[in-house]
Image (cartoon, helix red, strand yellow):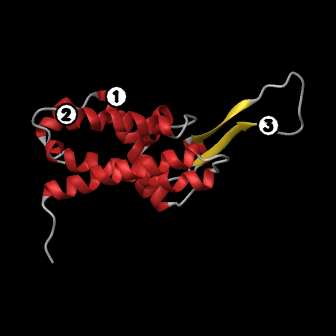
Amino acid sequence: MTMPSSTGFLRLAFDGFHQARARLGECLSAHGASADAVAIPAAETIYWGCVLDEQLTSDGGYKTVRGRAIVDVMRGARWIRNRSTHALPLTVERTGGLSLPIQVPITIEPVVVCWLRADRLPPEPPKYVDAAGRIAYDKNFADRPVSDPVEDLAQWFANEHGRPGSRLLGT
């Protein structure tokens, strides 16, 4: 069996990220999207984003242009990826809409699926505590619509794809 080249792995991760992101968008736009339905493509999108970032960090040029903001988003992404894959929690929730009892004045918040705060997720095993990752997650993901940090990552990867000398140019 032949193994893909490193460019092939990058293409796989780049395509995986964008395909999972498309599935996430489909779930979010479906009428009555549930947190259960959104959780799978959200976790998959974050997984592929982390894989892509981890593969690209072996490139000195990539490390040089990666700004503090995207490093912080990626640290939060890795934290929630690890929580999603090791503890299997539901990492998102549906908010907004009508709830009972109805009180006056009535304010109807739009229905949104948001990332949960870190304190609402199962604790990390003591051996794998990542306090900085948890802080980065709460700062960049928690209580935000699921698509917001995903779009931050998509914009970052699009910028990287167009950067002269990027290993993503061939994908």
Decide if residue 90 is in sight here.
Answer: no
Q: Is residue 37 above or below residue 100?
A: below
| In this view, the mark in front (3 or 1) | 3
Q: Is residue 89 above or below residue 64?
A: below
Q: Give coordinates of residue 126: x percent, y percent.
A: 46, 55
| Of marks 2 and 1, the one in the foreground | 2
**Which amino acid type is marked by label 2?**
Gly
Count all numbered tags in the image, as a single digit.
3
Lower sequence index among marks 2 and 1: 1
Instruction: Tell me if residue 38 comes above or below residue 151 in the rendering.
Output: below
First of labels 2, 3 by sequence position: 3
Residue named by callout 2: 162
Residue on which disc 3 sits? 98
User: Where residue 148 sits: x, y (%)?
Assistant: 48, 34
Please give left or right for residue 60 compared with residue 48 in the image.
Answer: left
Would you place residue 103 above or below residue 29 in this image?
A: above
Instruction: Inspect the image, locate mark 3, and give the three-letter code of the amino acid beneath it.
Output: Leu
Q: Secondary structure at mark 2?
A: helix
Look at the image and tell me in which quarter the N terminus lies. bottom left
Looking at the picture, tell me which residue is in the foreground, 69 or 100.
100
Front position in the image: 82 or 51: 51
Q: Secondary structure at mark 1?
A: helix
The residue that mark 1 highlights is 69
Distance, label 2 to label 3, CA atoms, is: 44 Å
